[in-house]
Amino acid sequence: MEIAQLEMFVAVAEAGSITKAASALLRAPSNVSTRIQQLERELNVKLLVRDKRQASLSADGELFLDYARQIVDLAHEAKSFTRRGEPRGRFRLGALESTAAVRIPALLAQFHLEYPAVELELEASSSGNLFDHLLSGQLTAAFSDGKPAAPSLTGLRAFTEDLVIISPPSVNVAGAGFRASNPTVFVFGTVCSYRQRFEDWLEAEGIVPSRVVEISSYYSMLACVAAGAGISMIPLSLLETLPGANGVRAHRIEGRLGQAETWLMWRRDCRSANLQAFIGTLREHLAALPEEPPAAGERLPDLQVR
């Protein structure tokens, strides 16, 4: 069993296709297929279920995938160690969409300047997907909402987000008439922790939506609200950066639902030089930030915050 075989197997499992994996690996599809077949013969198990267009994992393949990822990661770590332990090679980082857009661009630029040999791959996704990918080894670390929710994870608090309800400018969500109007609400998918906060707020306010519409981006969400189609929840730091933000009204959320802590999380058993370097850069970045954030709406004077 060779590391190259395992790398190919992991690539096919993640791409769902031998052709796509071969393209990413800069290899011929026939070579990838042959090497994985050799691996299957060595293990005496069928790892992939193949058809003409795709390759999916068998039951044994699902079980073997986590081991393969761990072995590949350890191999990369061993290579880094032989190079005096200097951070280098692939570093897979996840982040919430809003965090990726607003909070970490400067951090990632600083990290790249300090460690140019590290090949950072960023996945922007929902909190649920990030959690799953972190546990499965697809990500080395991730910025997500709240403290680590599994004993196998640890982390550090990075940012605090002020969450606001956005509505059309003429709407006051605190009014009794609005509560009884059964508005349409715009949300992300079910694995989004901000969606859960929004639903908790709706329940606490006694608001029963007439429709719940899933949206795939904050830009679309803002456009729908500005058009008068309903209401939504969004981090204020992100809202202040979006074009058209002055076309909606932002309403503060009192109490715990109005603030979300963003944590950097990683697996306790991770001994990655890249991770340790990134944690160090993050600590430096956080220490350099202002102790008190700017007042809500200060960076966007036209934004209506109530």
Image: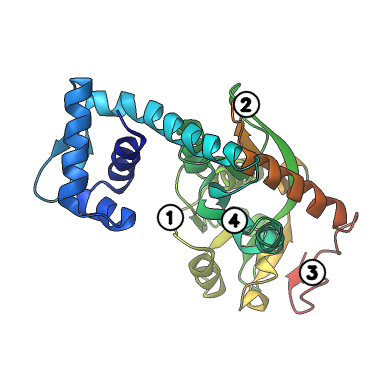
Mark in the foreground, 4 or 2: 4
Secondary element at tag 2: loop
Hey, what amino acid is under mark 4?
Answer: Ala
Is 298 left or right of 225, judged from the image as shown? Answer: right
Give the residue furthest to the right.
291
- Quarter of the image for residue 163 reads bottom right
Residue 238: x, y in percent?
A: 66, 64
Amino acid beneath label 2: Arg
Q: In this view, does 284 lie above or below 241?
A: above
Where is residue 98? Give x, y as percent: 61, 58
On the image, the x and y values in percent for residue 116 come to 63, 59
Q: Earlier in the sequence, mark 1 or mark 2?
A: 1
What is the crowding at mark 2: few (fewer than 14 residues within 10 Å), some, or many (at least 20)? few
User: Alpha-carbon neighbours of circle 3 within 10 Å: few (<14), some, or many (≥20)?
Assistant: some
Q: Quadrant of residue 297?
A: bottom right
The alpha-carbon separation of the residues under discs 4 and 2 comes to 24 Å
Residue at the spot of label 4:
117
Question: Which residue, given by chain and number where applicable, does mark 3 sit on?
Answer: 297
Residue at image mark 2: 268
Label 1 crowd bin: few (<14), some (14–19), many (20+), radius 10 Å: some
Q: Name the residue under label 1.
A: 214
Precedes in sequence: disc 4 or disc 3: 4
Eye-nearest disc, 1 or 4: 4
